[in-house]
Image (spheres, helix red, strand yellow):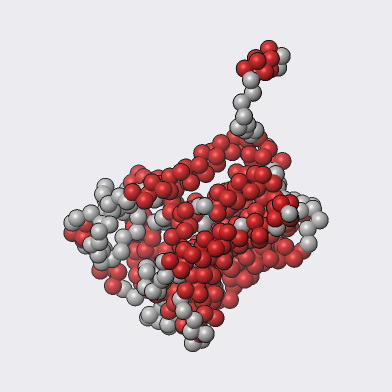
Amino acid sequence: MRNKILKNPFILFLPFLILYIVIAILFPTNGTTGDEGLYLKLGHRLLNGFFSPNRPNIDLGNGPGYPIILMPFLALNLPLLFITILNAVLYYLSIVFLFKTLKSLVSLKLSFLISIFWAFYINMYEYIPIIYTEVLTVFLITMIGYTLVKAFESKSNKKYIFFTGFLIGYLALTKPIFGYVIMVGLPVSIVMYLIKRSSQNYKKSFLILIIAFTITVPFLIYTYSLTNKAFYWGSSGGNNLYWMSSPDHLEYGSWVEYPVIDKESRMPGSKELLIQNHKKDFKVFDFTTLPRDSAVKAIAIENIKSHPKKFLLNCFCNMGRMLFNFPYSYKLENPLTLLRLPFNGLILVFFLFSIIPAIYNWKKINFGIRFLILFSLIYLGGSILGSAETRMFSMIVPIFLIWIAYIIQRSLKIKIKFDSDQKIFEKIKNP
């Protein structure tokens, strides 16, 4: 019976599905928290046959991936609780498929421990009861890890290459920044394939990214029809870059809402300080979408050129926010931030540990694992250049857990039980 449960992760991790459903029920959403209203609005638009209004009121701040998922719930007029219960199911499935991925790479014991770590990863709990893209994103990321490892097995079925490409493409439609990851990875994969045509791994990489890009083409054609700009993934990049490039010594590159609203989480007088620092630029925020995006990008580029050291400092602060939710501009600290430290701190320590053995044994590492970590590092590199938050790291934690487990299995041996002093002395004496 015990072996049967261990072999069936759907049963093994079922208690976590119950936990997540309870969280969704205990903290019901009203659809007005943060960007919830925006996603619901986009879902309703798709039901009415369009995604964005035409000029001058273009709205391309988000991709269509998540609103597409919301469409059936909205069409049937179901309570919002059903959407957050879907979050619970998707997070549970991410644990299951993380375990299935790990089980094909490392020991059953390590697979279980890493999967339990992800199941208790508290940074994601706050997204279960709200209508945000984060839980869908981690599900897609975990499924990509699963199908990618299968795709690079020597006797892999071609269907896994297609599934991986489809999932990466849909991920880009959900989180547009991954569209840029595809745009970076695709030409590299083409060059490597042309150099090493005999390599099945490079051929698979090329096919996966071609399929991923193809999935996004209809959306890119649509955005081109609205903007006359090729490869236009979204209109929020300029805003993020603007705040990221802020040269003011009291600002650390974090996004600030405009006009800033004094909340309990804001420092007293933050609104006045913000206006004082940015009053010369705020007029551009009243522009319509495309002119505003272009204007704030131009200001941001000028800020970076004029204050490169401050921009690098903001990038460093971005890393701190992604890992530890600190520091934010004009924001009072919250003790809940301490809960994030143990989880991401452990990930950071083990990842840093993995660097040396990974470099030394790079060619021996499973090609699918190499693809995954390079994919995530390109994503992180792009995220660091724009205003980032903890959730942007949390979304790709499954990839880092797969990487860490793979390296640990091959390079580190940990014993809970001590050897006797006599046994240790004998090992020292007779190595």
Q: Determine the image quadrant of residue 264.
A: bottom left
Residue at horizontal 50 percent and vertical 75 percent from the top = 82
Residue 231 vs 241, above or below: the answer is below
Residue 85 in the image, given as x and y percentages of width and height: 52, 70
Q: Determine the image quadrant of residue 184.
A: bottom right
Residue at horizontal 62 percent and vertical 65 percent from the top = 167
Residue 284 in the image, given as x and y percentages of width and height: 29, 68
Residue at horizontal 41 percent and vertical 66 percent from the top = 27
Residue 315 in the image, given as x and y percentages of width and height: 40, 48
Residue at horizontal 50 percent and vertical 73 percent from the top = 83
Q: Nearer the viewer, residue 209 or 408?
A: 408
Q: Nearer the viewer, residue 51 or 68?
A: 68
Residue 76 vs 205, above or below: the answer is below
Total residue callouts: 0
Asked whether residue 187 is in view, the answer is no
Residue 79 vs 48, above or below: the answer is above
